[in-house]
Image (cartoon, grey):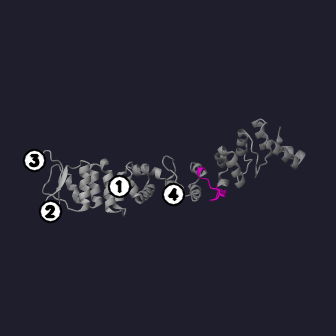
Amino acid sequence: MDYSHIENEFGGEIARQFFDSVAVNNEIKTSRYQEILCNMGYGYDVYDAFDISDDKMEVLIKKDVIEMNNVGLEYIRNHYKKYTALYIDENIEAYLRIITSDNFSYEEALHILGMEIGDKEKIDLLGLTTEPISVVGKGYSSSLIKYILDNNFDEHDENELYQHFSEYEEVIQSSIYRVAKSRIANIIDNSTIVLDDNLLSELLTMSKCSMDDKIQLWAKALPNLTEETCKKHFDELGFPELKGIFTKRNNYTKTYEDNSFIRDILYVLKKNTWIFDYYKKSDDEGYVVVKNPIKDKRY
């Protein structure tokens, strides 16, 4: 049958009553249920059947029988939660128009971030929350990742972002750097964090953290450095003279200034077996570095 002519034949009131009775009927075969509702073309701005079967609810949503509005959204959330994502997918533009800070849903926002809609719409939606959002492995665009790192940074992403800093686009690197700069103490204290060498360089040269913190950042990275990268970081720390340590033989005539920063660096080098030892040459002179004493009988 073609149900589109019922209104013409029986009048609007009877047609609507028929439509309403079908819309809440679980006994009708789903294919016929869909056929009747689609042929008649009515819809609901308020739908309140609470025991409709799942297959019928899918028809109601996919065929736009239930309008997207505040009442409809609350109804789906409360009574058919597993269909919330489908309801949003089928009505995304209307959904974005009605969402405010009062009816915002964090879970729904995460779902929308993965949808193929514009970044502007996603960023406007995120403007309603400061909750942390992960960007790792999500495939988000650069502009969206940048916004999230600047406004919704998830500390669980920290190690992944720092360790793979160089693999991200420059616009994202700038946001990762800003995050790292604000979390220096956490980087130093967290033994599991590994810094990309380029990120370490930026922290040593661009950040305004103390020299003590910079030396601790360098010390944390030392086990993963090469001789050449270590020399580079000595330049960045402002101690280029320490590059003289990397000679093939011990040099007992060369001394390094006696100050707390130099002592800290030499201590770390010895602790990590990059040098064998260091000692004061005299009270009035600096430190002598013993790189390898085994074959050097003068030591």
Q: Looking at the image, is mark 2 or mark 1 earlier in the sequence?
A: 1
Please, what is the three-letter code of the amino acid marked with disc 2? Asp
Q: Is tag 1's residue or tag 3's residue first in the polypeptide sequence?
A: 1
- Point out residue 215 in the picture as x, y percentages from the top left corner: 30, 57
| Separation of marks 1 and 4 at Cα, in angstroms | 23 Å
CA–CA distance between discs 4 and 3? 61 Å
* Residue denoted by label 1: 200
Asked if residue 115 shows in the view, the reply is no
Closer to the chain start, of discs 3 and 2, is: 2
Read off the residue under disc 3: 297
| Left or right: where 212 falls relative to 170 | left
Q: Mark 4 highlights which residue?
A: 147
Mark 2 or mark 1, whichever is nearer to me: 2
C-alpha span from label 3 to label 2 = 24 Å
Q: CA distance from mark 2 to mark 4?
A: 55 Å
Asked if residue 109 can be seen in this view, the reply is yes
Name the residue that disc number 2 marks: 283
Residue 245 image offset from top left, x and y in percent: 20, 53
Looking at the rendered structure, the kind of residue marked 4 is Tyr
Name the front one of labels 4 and 3: 3
Q: Are marks 2 and 1 in contact (CB under 8 Å)?
A: no
For marks 2 and 4, the one nearer the N-term is: 4
Residue type pointed to by label 1: Leu
Q: Secondary structure at mark 4?
A: helix
Q: Which is more N-terminal, label 3 or label 4?
A: 4
Numbered disc 2: secondary structure:
loop
Residue 97 lies left or right of residue 134; in this view the side is right
Name the residue nearer the viewer: 19 or 193.
193
- For the residues labelled 2 and 1, the Cα–Cα distance comes to 35 Å
